[in-house]
Amino acid sequence: MTTTQRPAGYAPVPAGTNPPLTFSGYRSTGLRAPSQAPIVLPHRLTEVTGPLLPGPIGPNDHDLTTQHANEPGGGEAQGQRIVVFGRVLDSDGRAVPDTLVEVWQANAAGRYRHARDNWPAPLDPNFSGGGRVLTDAQGNYSFTTIKPGAYPWGNHHNAWRPAHIHFSLFGQAFPQRLVTQMYFPDDPLFAQDPIYNSVPESARHRMVSTFDLDATRPEWALAFRFDIVLRGREQSVFEEPHA
């Protein structure tokens, strides 16, 4: 059974928040964007109550710099250490606990540990680029990682992607997944990034983290705050808007 009706109590995403499904400057959207109207599938009991995602969370999943430190010949990841932290909030500013927050990113040289990444920048054997944590009772999360590098991506002439970290959030069930990206403040590459510019201008600042001097770890790591709002007027920008 399918329906095009919205679930009761479901508020539409505020206008001017999420990017369109196709954006001419972001070439790959022309192939992957849906060509037909979306169909809202009803969520049944198993989809809204399970599987729950309390784990497993590995002991070093929150620290991307030390995930290989205990391996033979292993060590710490190379690059500028940073702490990325924030809260997951609902539209009323209330904490959202037990949310699975996953991140993935390029290394300090701008290269992903991925078979299809052919950018000839060095791979860091001590950096895989993936991590996961659960938010606590106050909706807090925190990762220690390396500031990712910019990289060319062939979308247009001399195209470079700004430094960024991908975020995926799972609620208590798989249908409750949202994906977004975090950028760093004052990046000179914003103007030529079609992904960043596909988002309505009024909402782009919601994808940019804030440097937080008070949260830095002296003589060790810089710190950036990135709060994620799931819905409402201050909703974060997500890659796939709800139908």
Image (cartoon, helix red, strand yellow):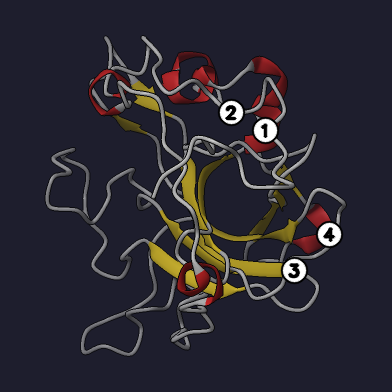
Q: Name the residue that disc number 4 marks.
A: 214
Q: Name the residue that disc number 3 marks.
A: 139
Q: Nearer the viewer, mark 3 or mark 4?
A: 3
* Residue 46 position in % (x across, y down): 46, 74
Q: Nearer the viewer, mark 1 or mark 3?
A: 1
Q: Are marks 3 and 4 in contact (CB under 8 Å)?
A: no
Front position in the image: 48 or 118? 48
Front position in the image: 198 or 220? 198
Q: Is residue 221 above or below residue 163?
A: below
Of labels 3 and 4, earlier in sequence is: 3
For residue 18, the mark is 2
Of labels 2 and 4, earlier in sequence is: 2
For residue 227, the mark is none
Of labels 1 and 3, earlier in sequence is: 1
The amino acid type found where label 1 is placed reads Val
Label 1 element class: loop
In this view, which residue lies farthest toward the front?
1
Label 2 element class: loop
The amino acid type found where label 4 is placed reads Asp
Q: Is residue 15 above or below residue 184?
A: above
Label 3 element class: loop
Q: Are marks 1 and 2 in contact (CB under 8 Å)?
A: yes
Q: Name the residue that disc number 1 marks.
A: 13
Whether residue 63 is visible, yes or no, is yes
Q: Nearer the viewer, mark 1 or mark 4?
A: 1
Q: Nearer the viewer, mark 3 or mark 2?
A: 2
Q: Is residue 151 left or right of residue 136?
A: left
The amino acid type found where label 3 is placed reads Gly
* Residue 34 position in % (x across, y down): 32, 26
Of labels 3 and 2, earlier in sequence is: 2
